[in-house]
Amino acid sequence: MKPRLGLFDSGLGGLTVLRRVLERHGQVSCLYLGDTARVPYGNRMPHEIRVIAKEVVQWLRDQQVTAVVMACNTTNALASDVAEAVAGGIPVVRLIEAAANMLSEARVGVLATPAAAASGAYGKQIEISRPGTMVIEQGCPAFVPLIETGQLSSEELYQAAREYLNPLLAAQVEAVVLGCTHYPLLEPILRQILPQDVRLIDPAIGVARELDVLLGSPTIPLGTSLSLTSTRFCVTANPEGFATRATPWLGERPQVELVSLQCPACAS
């Protein structure tokens, strides 16, 4: 069977993962689900996030995907076991493991949603991959709502970034993990505040590399423009708004379908 990746996030953030995958693996068939009816996930309670993960992965399975990419750090942190169980044996690719494998620094900061930061998932995984690393996980409740409403150049976003980075700067971190798939869009702002020698870690790059195991070595020449011809986009609310906001991320306006995640298996 030809590989078909199912990627999901609460909204736009997972598009940063989709971009990295398509930049490396070109015409691979992808299904992207933005659960926009429930964005943001990161301000929800853990039990809600686990129910959401069950519903989303079951829906992706029903669409006959051959692998699931958890393009959402909050569900990675709080519901990866749920995703594995519902996936029923098809591969599940996680961001947190990919990020931990990219690190070489001794002092690391993680910017994450409140739920992901509170779980300590990044610290636990980094301790497994690189024992002895000092990790500070910082919850950033304002970031996703501001990004989803297109306020990337607002003073409010800049001030929030300064507030969230202050503890990391005080700890003299050497690398900062972008622990939410929305956050690569903040790189210009973060670069204004962080010292030049602090490395920004985008877990999506690691995910795209790890997919080599499933998809084979990349064959896309450097500089090839992004193609969306083999990608289907679905959302659970406001498809037109999603398409409009996604256009700057993707370089073209995607065709977006409105879908429902209701299914008998999700109710049990």
Image: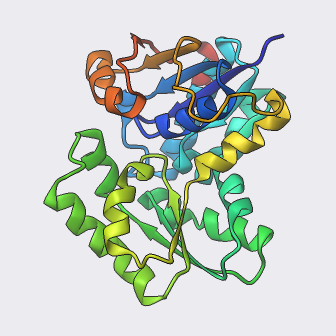
Give how far across and how far down residue 242 sits, in percent. Answer: 32, 24
Give how far across and how far down residue 263 sits, in percent. Answer: 57, 14
Residue sitting at x 50%, y 37%: 14
Is residue 262 in view from this perspective? no
| Nearer to us in this view, 111 or 198 | 198
State left or right for residue 160 relative to residue 267: left
Is residue 125 in view from this perspective? yes
State left or right for residue 259 relative to residue 210: left
Give how far across and how far down residue 101 sits, in percent. Answer: 74, 60
Give how far across and how far down residue 29 sits, in percent. Answer: 65, 16
Total numbered labels placed on residues in the image: 0
Q: Is residue 229 above or below residue 91?
A: above
Residue sitting at x 45%, y 28%: 34
The image quadrant of residue 62 is top right
What is the quadrant of the C terminus in the image?
A: top right
What is the quadrant of the N terminus in the image?
A: top right
The image quadrant of residue 167 is bottom left
Q: Is residue 255 above or below residue 120?
A: above
| Nearer to us in this view, 185 or 263 | 185
Q: How is the image coloured?
A: rainbow
Q: Is residue 78 above or below residue 189?
A: above
Residue sitting at x 17%, y 60%: 156
Q: Is residue 107 above or below residue 46?
A: below
Residue sitting at x 59%, y 12%: 230
Residue found farthest to the left: 155
The image quadrant of residue 155 is bottom left
